[in-house]
């Protein structure tokens, strides 16, 4: 079992991001710990549907339905490699184990007053975080994807941005004019092609670390500034995050197209 997981991880690493590989490794180690050291040296074909379901039920009791589903998905991906690429098992039965229903968490839409207050606050206190929020909101990207953008990934002439998405190695999106005007002011041609667009200093440049570490820096900055905003009378709820802006921007855009431009 241990050898089968090691081989599957070595092979799948060639086709996924470092973040995803880290998740797969964590899940594999967690499952192996559940089996125990003695069982790790048995034949992989002895791992049955009942054993995996028992494991997943334990994860569900200790965490949540969403986490349980994530562990199920990771294990299924590794078992698919064992089946199709390594020929170690005859069939990946995990893909037929049902997912648990997860309560959908919806991000609250901020009011126009809050958007104006926060935008004005960030213009003074953290312009780089404001840029992240604008890219997430206008280009419908995840914060981790924004942190991956390098200068060479931005084509201002054709209004395009190239980036590595969660489900694709390379994705292309058109940059809307609302965002383009902010990027044009940054004089991106004066920086190295491999410089990251987003860095802690606020100026494009090198930023060592993994995707997860870079995203964590941005998330912590927003959390820290939320406390500072509260001191200045800008009230946000506990669950408000960068995605809250995305939902708010989309809602405002829809209202603008319907009311100002009378579009269907």
Image (cartoon, rainbow, N blue to C red):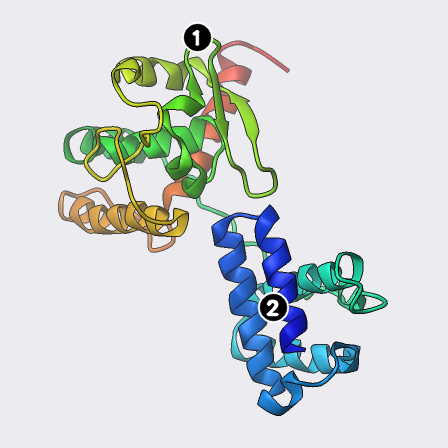
Q: Determine the residue positioned at 45% across, 38% down.
A: 145
Q: Classify mark 1: helix, strand or loop.
A: loop
Residue 96 in sight: yes
Q: Nearer the viewer, residue 131 or 170?
A: 170
Tell me how many marks there are. Answer: 2
Residue 219 horizontal/vertical position (percent): 32, 48
Q: Determine the residue positioned at 53% across, 79% down.
A: 62
Q: Is residue 234 placed above or below 5 in the rendered structure?
A: above
**Residue at label 1?**
157
Of labels 1 and 2, earlier in sequence is 2
Q: Determine the residue positioned at 47% across, 36% down.
A: 247
Q: Classify mark 2: helix, strand or loop.
A: helix
Question: Which quadrant, please, contains the N terminus?
Answer: bottom right
Q: Is residue 112 placed above or below 236 in the rendered structure?
A: above
**Left-right relation of 84 to 263:** right
Q: Is residue 163 placed above or below 21 in the rendered structure?
A: above
Q: Residues within 10 Å of mark 1 (few under 14, many from 20)?
A: few
Residue at the farthest bottom position: 38
Q: Nearer the viewer, residue 30 or 6?
A: 6
**Residue at label 2?**
6
Question: Which quadrant, please, contains the C terminus?
Answer: top right
Q: Determine the residue positioned at 72% across, 65% down.
A: 79
Q: Nearer the viewer, mark 1 or mark 2?
A: 2
Q: Residues within 10 Å of mark 2 (few under 14, many from 20)?
A: some
Residue 179 horizontal/vertical position (percent): 38, 19
Residue 23 horizontal/vertical position (percent): 52, 61
**Left-right relation of 99 to 130:** right
Which quarter of the picture shows residue 94?
A: bottom right
Residue 221 horizontal/vertical position (percent): 24, 47
Which quarter of the picture shows residue 229?
A: top left
């Amino acid at each position: 079992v241990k050898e089968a997981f090691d081989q599957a991880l070595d092979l799948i690493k060639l086709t996924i991001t470092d973040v995803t590989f880290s998740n797969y490794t964590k899940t594999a180690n967690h499952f192996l710990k559940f089996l125990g050291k003695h069982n790790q040296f048995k034949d992989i074909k002895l791992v049955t549907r009942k054993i995996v379901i028992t494991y997943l039920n334990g994860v569900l009791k200790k965490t949540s339905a969403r986490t349980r589903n994530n562990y199920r998905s990771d294990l299924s991906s590794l078992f698919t490699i064992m089946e199709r690429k390594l020929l170690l098992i005859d069939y990946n039965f995990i893909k037929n184990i049902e997912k648990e229903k997860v309560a959908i968490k919806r991000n609250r839409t901020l009011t126009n007053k809050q958007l104006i207050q926060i935008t004005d606050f960030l213009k003074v206190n953290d312009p780089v975080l404001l840029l992240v929020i604008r890219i997430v909101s206008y280009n419908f990207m995840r914060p981790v994807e924004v942190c991956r953008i390098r200068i060479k990934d931005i084509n201002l002439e054709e209004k395009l941005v190239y980036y590595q998405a969660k489900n694709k190695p390379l994705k292309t999106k058109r940059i809307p004019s609302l965002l383009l005007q902010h990027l044009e002011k940054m004089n991106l041609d004066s920086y190295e092609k491999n410089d990251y667009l987003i860095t802690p200093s606020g100026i494009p440049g090198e930023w060592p670390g993994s995707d997860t570490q870079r995203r964590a820096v941005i998330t912590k900055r927003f959390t820290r500034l939320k406390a500072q905003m509260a001191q200045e009378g800008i009230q946000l709820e506990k669950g408000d995050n960068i995605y809250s802006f995305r939902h708010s921007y989309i809602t405002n855009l829809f209202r603008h197209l319907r009311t100002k431009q009378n579009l269907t």
